[in-house]
Amino acid sequence: MPPAVLVGIDTEADDQWSAEGRRRLGVRNALRLPALQALCDGFGIRPSYLVTHEMAARKESADVLRGLAREGRCEIGAHLHPWTSPPFRPEDVAGHTYPHNLPVELLDRQLTDLAALITQELGVRPTTYRAGRNGFDGGSLPILERLGFTVDTSVDPLFNERRKGGMAFAGAPLVPYHPDYGDVRRPGASKILEVPISAATSPALPKAAEALYARLRPIPWRGALRRLGLKAVWLRPSYAALPDMVAFASRLARARVPCFNIIFHSSELLPGGSPYTPDEASVSRFLEDLTRLFEHLTTRLGAVGRTYGQFRAEWDARA
């Protein structure tokens, strides 16, 4: 079976990196989604829009997403931001809390309400989840299972925000697995299929050495190693140069990894909607790199577009 191209888009309000953006919760980036969808259509790719509360609740964004879902061109999943998903606490709004740091009862209520809102407003029951700011641990698994989720894609093998109170996933696999309730970096007994974000070092390191690298703080240690030629690579145009993404994807193909998991934010499609795309020229560069990456994956590597839900069904069929 050919490898899958998975595109998970954190579909959220404009500029969630700034306090002003989190206060305003503008959703103008949703108007850019039809053009992105057309780009994906051209390569036979069905993206997965992982939707926050405000994007499902606001008419202008919900209308766009509902239309795409009705046409069967995409998947609608869930993306929890504790500072926009009621019921929320003032401290969560001020500090844009990681989901895994919420009391479990509050996390349960927010996820339950988010799933219900998406079902009501977009006409689709979400089964794929990514935690906002990758704030995902074993406490989330029973809640997701109860709500009928089948896929999580929060684990990033190179993600490390321990210094901020966030998660670190050093040592996590690059291939899909069912996570352990006690440590989501390890295979275990959960019914959820974890589809890790495609991330690794360049040049490649043995997994044990890569885990050591992943434990390093970006500043100063990863920056110093980058100057010596060792860097992190994601399949994410705002984080990695096109040649690095192409080389990494080819490396994954040689290793027979079953999927290429591309990630970005919907707000990166809007000039000024993210720190990575401050103007129209930077959005154009982002889309051009994404196009070339799609072209490499589908034409050169023979990968096929899948939603996370489709991938899960095919994964189960192989077992």
Image (cartoon, rainbow, N blue to C red):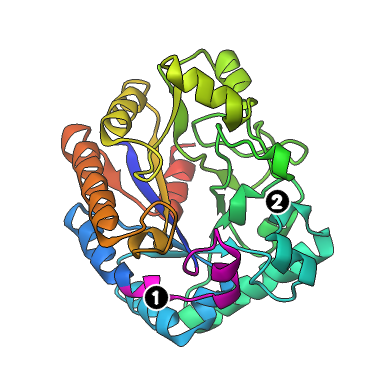
**What amino acid is found at the position of numbered circle 2 in the picture?**
Leu
Dot label at residue 144: none
Q: Position of residue 291 (x, y in %)?
A: 21, 48
Residue ranking furthest to the bottom = 59
The residue tagged 2 is: 141
Query: For mark 1, what is the residue?
Result: 28
Residue sitting nearer the eye, 170 or 6: 170
Q: Earlier in the sequence, mark 2 or mark 1?
A: 1
Residue at 31%, 70% (x, y): give it: 32
User: The residue under label 1 is which amino acid type?
Assistant: Arg
Instruction: Answer few, some or many: residues within 10 Å of disc 1's Cα (few below 14, many 20 plus, some between 14 and 19).
Output: some
Kindly state the secondary structure of the residue where label 2 is placed.
Answer: helix
Q: Residues within 10 Å of mark 2 (few under 14, many from 20)?
A: many
Q: In this image, 94 relative to 130: left or right?
A: right
Q: Is mark 1 on a helix, strand or loop?
A: helix
Tell me whether the residue at label 2 lies in contact with that at label 1, contact meaning CB atoms closer than 8 angstroms. Answer: no
The boundaries of the magenta stretch are 13-31
In front here: 92 or 315? 92
Which quadrant is the N terminus positioned in? Answer: top left
Res. 1 visible in picture: no
Q: Position of residue 261 (x, y in %)?
A: 41, 42
Residue at (66, 65) in percent of width and height? 147
Q: In this view, does 107 lie above or below 226?
A: below
Residue 84 magenta: no
Residue 102: % across, % down: 78, 58
Quadrant hosting residue 230: top left
Q: Residue sitting at 27 percent across and 47 percent down?
A: 290
**192 horizontally vs 201: left or right:** right
Q: How far apart are marks 2 and 1 (CA)?
A: 32 Å
Q: Position of residue 191 (x, y in %)?
A: 64, 47
- Seen in the image, is 33 located left or right of residue 275? left
